[in-house]
Image (spheres, helix red, strand yellow):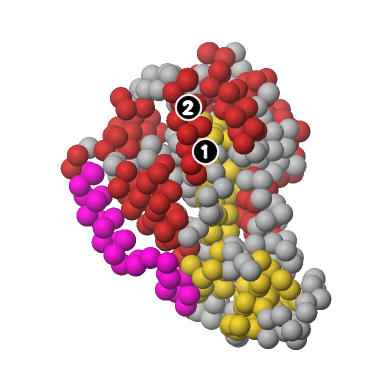
Amino acid sequence: MNHADPDPASPVDLRLGPGLVLSDPRQAPTPGWVEIVGGRIHHVGPEPTPAVAIEAVSLHDRIVIPALVNTHCHTSQQLGRGLADDVDLLTWLHDRIWPYEIALTEADAEVSAALCAIEQVRSGTTTIADPGGRHVDGMARGLEAVGIRAFLGRSTMDSGDGRPALDCDDLAEALDRQDDLARRWHGRGRMRFSYTLRTIFNCSDELIVATAERAAALGTVVQMHVAEVPEELSFSLSTRGATTVRHLGSLGVLGPRFLAVHATWVDDDEIALLAATRTPVSHNAGSNLKILGVPRVAEWIEAGVVVALGTDGAPSNNRMSMIDEMWLASLTQKGRRVDPTVLPAGEVLAMATTGGAKALGLADEIGRIEVGMAADLVIVDPRTANMSPLHDPHAALVTSMKSENVESVLCEGQWLMRDRVITTVDEAAVIDEARSRAAAIRSRM
Ligand SMILES: [Zn+2]
């Protein structure tokens, strides 16, 4: 616990307490108070400071947790939820998702992103990494309206078969488009830009290397779908002479700012390589179970890989809730190893908070409730049928919490949801518009 020794004469903006506080996701929550000044955590401790509070919220029986970090969230696919169920990956991508993406307008992308952001807030997430769509300006506007923190990206490809007709940039065009978006969005409010690579099927080695260089120059992350299906490994072997992760290692692009998404099919040597290069991996338990397979996440953690969680997109999950992802991530590994001790609650909560923060280069900013960090907080109300009784509050945050238990959400001290009401946009209007736009998109596909 930390005490900032505040000046009693200067008021705090918001005082939360007394309640249970999950300061460090790996440790059980303890009774205490949280105070916020200027969007940052000013005090965490068993007692409040003597300062006057401009606003005070009683946490009677609630739990305050760090807001969750979704490291793989396709915001522009939100209006495609339900378009691609029960089909194989190539049908999913070529016959369902690419036609959907081609039919999507910039205005559609804005509504899609807003709807996605609302679902994120409702399930306790305030930071997302979007691996990219085609209408980044629209996506950014939708996310800004709801108020969450986001890494934007443009889905980038420069080669390979089957690319949609509107996505046939060459190397220079693919990089120029991203540079332009980076100039306009990186560091604007809660928006950051990240360079993205779709998959090795559609990215040349020149694009991969140049992308990593540009991301390093901007001080941001690269996002890439990696080792998703066995077919990808055969493709990499036949075109590059090595499986995807090995090949990325030999190109010199792996590292703490290279977010490897999925990595479903990696062998022991590749796991060791990810650990040695401190390359974070975004594990998407729901979409893996649906489409890709079950990766050996427990072994990744044992090898020292930084593991974060993500929902993936609405057509591949279809629940865009990090709370569901925590539960699935835990259960799939326990079942796969037939060992109930793997991925205990603290480990899974860390993946969803500090792991995500590390994966996005924000370890000093978000993921824990600690003095000086951004006030990204979730107030959980466990007084429901699904969370009662509460013998073990730490485990219950993974085993029995659902989105319905998320009562209020703060991002940098701003209420994005208060008493289950989204405060920044008219949620019902966004849902209405999303439904009518989704129908129109489907008719254009
Ligand atoms: Zn993805």
- Mark 2 packing: few (<14 Cα in 10 Å), some, or many (20+)? few
Tell me if residue 333 comes above or below residue 327 in the rendering: above
* Residue depicted at 50% across the width and 79% down the height: 384
Query: Toward the viewer: 107 or 131?
Result: 107
Query: Toward the viewer: 365 or 251?
Result: 365
Residue at image mark 1: 182
The outermost residue toward the front is 9
Distance Cα–Cα, label 1 vs label 2? 10 Å
The image quarter in which residue 380 lies: bottom right
Residue at image mark 2: 176
Q: Which residues are magenta?
A: 417-442
- Mark 1 packing: few (<14 Cα in 10 Å), some, or many (20+)? many
The image quarter in which residue 269 lies: top right
Q: Is residue 419 magenta?
A: yes
Q: Amino acid at mark 1?
A: Ala
* Residue depicted at 54% across the width and 44% down the height: 186
Secondary element type, mark 1: helix
Image quarter where the C terminus lies is top left
Judge left or right: residue 222 versus residue 339. left
Image quarter where the N terminus lies is bottom right
Number of numbered discs overlaid on the protein picture? 2
Q: Position of residue 225 (x, y in %)?
A: 52, 34
